[in-house]
Amino acid sequence: MSLTFGASAEGFDVVVVGSGGAGLSAAIMAKEAGASVVVLEKMPYLGGNTNFASGGMNAAGTKQQLAAGVTGDSPELFYKDTMKGGHNRNNPALLKTMTENAKYAEEWLVDIGAKFCFRKGRGGGQSIARSHGPCDGSAVGPEVLRVLQKKASEDKIEIRPQNQVVDIALKDGRVSSVKVKTPEGEKVIDAKAVVLATGGFGANLDMVVKYRPELKGFVTTNHKGAQGEGIELAQKLGASLTDMDQIQIHPTVVKKDGHLISESMRSRGGILVNHDGKRFCNELLTRDVVSQHVLAQKGGEAYLIYDQSIFDSNKLSRGYYQNGYSVKGETLDELAAKLKMPAENLKATFKAYWKAAETGKDEAFGRPEMVIALNKAPFYAALISPGIHHCMGGVTINTKAEVQNKQGKSIPGFYAAGEVTGGVHGGNRIGGNAVADIVTFGRIAGTNAAAYVKTVR
Ligand SMILES: Cc1cc2nc3c(=O)[nH]c(=O)nc-3n(C[C@H](O)[C@H](O)[C@H](O)COP(=O)(O)OP(=O)(O)OC[C@H]3O[C@@H](n4cnc5c(N)ncnc54)[C@H](O)[C@@H]3O)c2cc1C
């Protein structure tokens, strides 16, 4: 296929499209391998959905996990949990790559300055705790972006906001240039290789509904630039797509504006209670299953309830309270009154949970882990309902992050990483696995793009 644009004024070895975690990881690796690199970002701000990643980053066998005394984890167990959580739909080779390399991705982030600690409590669908995040209990994404942006700046990588890639050209079957819309007009930049790191399409509700009609009317947790045009750019070059209809709804989202209440609130001990003040499921099931349980409750909604000890250990809780996403009750009676639910039911729910936490056996719902007693007043509740959250599907890549065409062949010079790709997470993403995915495959894409460029000089 040949698809060339007009004359260009400039050129780079590697053009990275998108400034989220995947794009910046790729840019740094490509630059450090000797390539000239530019990052193009369509929005006026940098970082995409990576800005919002609040819970954590999963990795098996890290120094922090071992130091916390968690010794039973391994890439194999990480693989098994993720494959099961993804309904055995995950691409085995891609998943193996992620589960084996997440540890090195986490180590790399720490090496370039991330202040990461191990986080207690397992996430939905995990058989062991393997989450990492900032030691001060704050959100993971901003810390990942902070160190990636710092490193990119030290490496003198230019990042251009308000530069939207609207087309990618091939010459003699190889990637050759990109067409970019900028505030000064359209321009062409020559590129020996392109890394597509444009993220998902979770904010493009028409596109979501095209693949999953039953998601019409759901709110989204995604940043507004998550429009999925990267998928169209790749399709135009003949790329094959994987699992486009696999779109995750997250169970704990604020209905009025799509604000996410992080899964880490449940990992740390929070429970779900319906309008009658009763629990209705094991809160540590995978997101797709918990979402279905919530949708089956009155109004398709429920309350996430937690105590002061979770409030103190998870910085996100302060934001939820200050922004009016949660209410506080000094006692369970006061909380029940604020939530207009029968106090005796809520108190009976807690009494049963306290007993379960004490004995380590949740007879009612089989929750496998109760990391805290959940009895430190005051108590907090956030009204939640499922919302569109993650696109598991996207552009097909191989383990080298090379974009695949419909015949299963790599398109020379074309790489992709992060949420724009499909296959790693199968039919359901496990919380904390996206950050592991974007940094792992971003690094692979950047390294391989730089190596490829040397072959076409
Ligand atoms: C609220 C929320 C909380 C989350 N919490 C977690 C968590 O705790 N742990 C976890 O593992 N995952 C979490 N995730 C998922 C995770 O944040 C994302 O999957 C991941 O950050 C995606 O990274 P990315 O680099 O692939 O894409 P993004 O970070 O979305 O970056 C893509 C960038 O490409 C830009 N772009 C798009 N098209 C173009 C174009 N044509 N030209 C130029 N630029 C373009 C976008 O504007 C964007 O800046 C969360 C997601 C959300 C929405």
Image: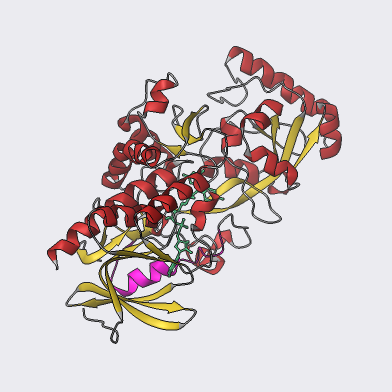
Say how many tags the image has.
Answer: 0
Numbered range of the magenta stretch: 223-241
Q: Nearer the viewer, residue 28 or 75?
A: 28
| Residue under the point 22% across and 81% down | 2
In the rendered structure, does residue 368 fall within the stretch colored magenta? no
Residue 375 in the image, given as x and y percentages of width and height: 71, 21
| Residue under the point 55% across and 44% down | 54
Which quadrant does the C terminus fall into? bottom left
Q: Quadrant of residue 156?
A: bottom left
Q: Nearer the viewer, residue 235 or 402?
A: 402
211 up-or-down from 129: above or below: below
Residue 304 visible in the current orientation: yes
Residue 448 in the image, given as x and y percentages of width and height: 22, 55
| Residue under the point 67% across and 26% down | 309
Residue 48 in the image, given as x and y percentages of width and height: 50, 58
Which quadrant does the N terminus fall into? bottom left
Residue 385 in the image, given as x and y percentages of width and height: 66, 48
221 up-or-down from 409: above or below: above
